[in-house]
Amino acid sequence: MNLVLRPHGTWVIVLSFIFSFMLSIMPLPIWISAWRPDWVAMVLIYWCIAIPHRTGVATGWSVGIIHDVLNNTLLGQHALSLCIIAYISVKLHLRIRLFPRLQQAISIAGLIIINQTLSIWIYNIFTNFQIDWSVIFSAISSMILWPWLFVILRDMRRSYRVF
């Protein structure tokens, strides 16, 4: 008997990205907007860690292009940075999976800092150069929210049997 395992639960992955896009474009007061977590990058990192055979660099590029269009930024700005983050996540997925939640959160903060720094660097190539320290605030808030996001997405992945 030949058993073929086909990908299952693609709609869960797509819906999680749609929800992350909604959270990333939701208006916030100016005083807290610097602390906005990088929802799209966190969801991409989770799926790259959880099922690296289905999500990776191509997913990062696609999600990044959509993120650029939604945020009205330079086309390819987020795509390149998310592509690099997806590559790092897939390469290190076995290590990151074994980390305790606190160490995972610190790793995620590092990846978010890389993502934000690349995105700002690409933006500054084509505009006036400005140093933006909000990268650290976004990484801190992403690090704080990572354990809860991880548990929510893991439970969704298990209950809908996404593999």
Image (cartoon, rainbow, N blue to C red):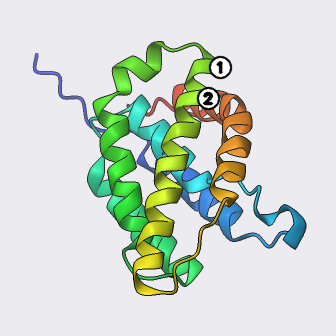
Q: Position of residue 144 (x, y in %)?
A: 74, 35
**In the rendered picture of this protein, how many numbered marks are placed on residues?**
2
Question: In terms of secondary structure, where does tag 1 sit?
Answer: helix
Residue ID at (89%, 66%): 31
Marking on residue 145: none
Q: Which residue is mark 2?
A: 105
Q: Which residue is mark 1?
A: 102
Alpha-carbon neighbours of circle 1 within 10 Å: few (<14), some, or many (≥20)? few
Alpha-carbon neighbours of circle 2 within 10 Å: few (<14), some, or many (≥20)? many
Identify which amino acid the numbered label 2 is placed on: Ala
Identify which amino acid the numbered label 1 is placed on: Leu
Question: In terms of secondary structure, where does tag 2 sit?
Answer: helix
- Does residue 42 appear to the left or right of 51 in the view shown? right
Tell me whether circle 2 and circle 1 mark residues in contact (CB < 8 Å). yes
- Does residue 35 appear to the left or right of 127 in the view shown? right
- Name the one closer to the observer, 124 or 91: 124
